[in-house]
Image (cartoon, rainbow, N blue to C red):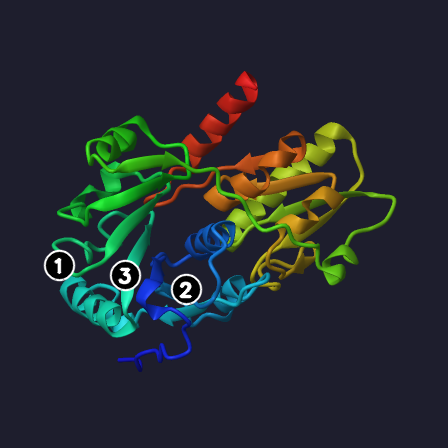
Amino acid sequence: MQKQKDISKYSNPARLKLYYAPGGGLGHLTRGWAFANQNNWNQDEVIFMSARADDLKFEKVLQTGSNSYSFINIPSELHHKSDSLQNWLSSQIIDLGITEVYLDTFPSGMIGEWNDFPDLPINFHLIARNIRLDRYRPFLGNHPTFEKIFEVDGLSSEYATYLNKLKSSIRPWELEYPELKPNPALLEQLLVGQENWLIVHSGSADEVFALLDMVIDDKAHAGIEAEILIIHPNPGIIREVPVVSFFPAYPIFPYVNRIYTAAGFNSMKQAGKFSKKHFALPFPRKYDDQFLRLKLSQKNKTQA
């Protein structure tokens, strides 16, 4: 077990918030980082918890911008043991003096660890990204009662119906990301006076190749000579075109001619204001529905 965090540095530990982002990808922490910045939480009033918070990529997420947020890593031996994980969570909450918990995406946690949670003096809130309820339902149980549900995503009718039955305060929430200047080293990767097409992804090599095939097809169809640059956490993910690792990528969006991403939550939100030059390719995910998100986005464009 990891050592408990010393909370003596916190200016007001009695109001300490926990943002619980247990997913294995960068998306959950990135969403939490944006939510914390949007609500002007400083580093003394919130701690992030993730299943992979010891990964350097995750540390980079939480230390970008004006705040350098602290995080706790969920021990790997607890990732598949809901009872043991729940005991560890309750101990962390008591020891840290947590009074507010923000659950990212999963009302019951990844494996049901928040079901039948001990009765502690804490308020729970849910950051409601869409969920494939057909896949998640086996873990959905007697989860905490949420004081507020922040609806940050377009939801399926099935999931929206479920949340509405909870009788919590549901607030539609347009997530905003901090205004940041582009990294000068990243700008240097763009060729002046030429078309620059950007691929941003953090997934597998197969998915990067699928996006690259989409770009190559679009180049051929448009008859445009464009330079291709890929931003990915692993610069060695493929060797066919230049790949660089920068977080966050979105500050460079105004400087490129086209943006290609998957239809993940953060990618779609960050590229939303550049819809005319943004092209998305949905990929299958266990709990997320990128196909629905892209469909809803295209519907909103048509109605705008």
Packing grade of label 2 (10 A; few <14, some 14-19, many >=20) is some
Q: Residue at x 36, y 63 (%)?
A: 50
Tell me which corner region of the image, top left, top right, bottom left or bottom right, holds residue 73: bottom left
The secondary element bearing badge 2 is classed as loop
Spatial distance from mark 3 to mark 1, Cα to Cα?
Answer: 12 Å
The disc, 2 or 1, on the residue closer to the chain's N-terminal end is 2
In the image, which disc is placed on residue 119? 1
Q: Is residue 294 left or right of residue 136?
A: right
Position of residue 126 measured from the top left corner of the image (x, y, whole percent):
31, 46
Q: Is residue 265 above or below residue 182?
A: above
The amino acid type, in three-letter code, at marker 3 is Thr
Position of residue 298 measured from the top left corner of the image (x, y, whole percent):
52, 25
Q: Is residue 278 above or below residue 180?
A: above
Q: Residue at x 32, y 35 (%)?
A: 170
Q: Nearer the viewer, residue 32 or 22?
A: 32
Tell me which corner region of the image, top left, top right, bottom left or bottom right, holds residue 71: bottom left
Q: Residue at x 59, y 40 (%)?
A: 271
Residue position marked by numbered label 2 in the rendering: 45
Spatial distance from mark 3 to mark 2, Cα to Cα?
Answer: 11 Å
The disc, 3 or 1, on the residue closer to the chain's N-terminal end is 3
Residue extending furthest right?
Answer: 193
Position of residue 123 measured from the top left corner of the image (x, y, whole percent):
25, 53
Q: Is residue 6 left or right of residue 254?
A: left
Q: Are marks 2 and 1 in contact (CB under 8 Å)?
A: no
Position of residue 264 measured from the top left corner of the image (x, y, whole percent):
47, 43
The amino acid type, in three-letter code, at marker 2 is Glu
The disc, 3 or 2, on the residue closer to the chain's N-terminal end is 2
Q: Nearer the viewer, residue 71 or 253?
A: 71
Dividing the image into 4 quarters, which one contains the N terminus? Answer: bottom left
Q: Is residue 3 left or right of residue 215?
A: left
Dividing the image into 4 quarters, which one contains the C terminus? Answer: top right
Residue position marked by numbered label 3 in the rendering: 99
